[in-house]
Image (spheres, grey):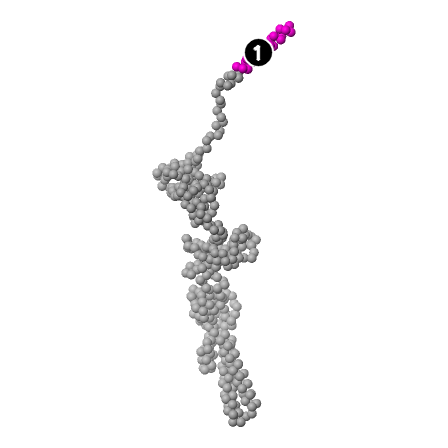
Amino acid sequence: MTRRRQLIVYTLGILGVVGLTLVCGCSRDAPAAPEAAAKPSDSVPSVEVTDNQLKRVKVEKVVARAFAEQREALGYIDFNQDHSTPISTPYPGRILTVPAKQGDDVAQGAVLFTLESPDLIQAESTLISTAGVLALTTSVLDRARTLFRDQGIPQKELDQAVADQQSADGAYRAARDAVRVFGKTNAQMDEIVASRKTDLSMPVLAPMAGRVTQRNAAVGTLVQPGMTPAPFVVSDIHTMWLIAAVTEADLPAVRLGQRVVVKVAAYPGRQFDATISNIGESVDPTTRRILVRSEVKDPKHELRPQMFASFVIQTGDPVMTPAVPANGVVREGDGTMVVWVTTDHKRFVQRQVKIGLIQEGFSQILSGLSPGDEVASEGALFLSNALATANQ
């Protein structure tokens, strides 16, 4: 019985080996299963346009342009306060006439307004009296010299006459200087002395040449020294101020004397030259910005206070790099920047690029394009929308 069982086991083992051999042979001859074609060949997104659609697309060649590292800030125009002077009266009084008008260009020494001042009347009265005393003491001195020559008086009396005349002369000169402070000329003072009449009109003169930028004076108004607002403000408008708020991150790039380019909304496409003249000492704790002041050259007097303006500071040397119009670059939903490249003006291929600065309507291309490539400078967004619609 045992021998018979061994024979059965041996037979079954042989049959198992033969079956396994047949199975393996069949597996080698069967065709291979397809790979997970989940890895299709990557295709470049493209759009083909019709002749009618091409009218909505403008194609331009990529060119190399100079891009300079720069900082920008926003601000406003103001008068140059270093060359702007509020003009008041040094003495109280009532305004008699106001010949100057707001907006007038005045020369240095021009009469802005005239004033009736009690202090002027007092000064002119002193001038008249001291002139009379000087005339009297001069006459006495002349007689004393004649008498002394004829031995009619002693030396003591002549010395006294000389001292009196010199004292009167000093008082007269001081009186003329006091009246001169009120704006009177030598000829006018001589007329006052000759006529023995006081002149009530005190002129207030422009201390500098410029334009009348404020006028708060009117006939009959009582004015005081140091009153606010001042009756007049005269400003030199050949230079103006641009006061801009610069972020604290840009502050290390800002230096005194640095040249900046100023643009104002009133003159699109125009630029004005300026120089940084002052940098604030502290940062605003709310806005985290610091005020920077620039002097703007305005030879044609085109700028006005409170005009909205911006300035651009060049902080590095220009670099020539490929550039495309800013409208030719489209930001995708994932944040990548793309352009549409073509060789036949029919088929446009999407290409990812890396952009840098945006200046004067052009985007700096750091990678992805070369000079001479043709791209859609207008209608790039239309092409992106067409691709998105086709993929839906």
Residue 309: % across, % down:
46, 55
- Looking at the image, the residue that sits furthest to the right is 2
**Quadrant where the N terminus lies?**
top right
Identity of the amino acid at label 1? Answer: Ile
Q: Residue at x 48, y 28 (%)?
A: 37
Residue labelled with disc 1: 14
Residue 205: % across, % down:
46, 70
Most common secondary structure along the magenta stretch: helix
Magenta stretch? 1-22
* One can see residue 29 in this view: yes
Residue 25: % across, % down:
51, 16
Q: Residue at x 53, y 94 (%)?
A: 151
* One can see residue 326 in this view: no
**Quadrant where the C terminus lies?**
top left
User: Does the magenta portion include 12?
Assistant: yes
Q: Residue at x 49, y 23 (%)?
A: 33
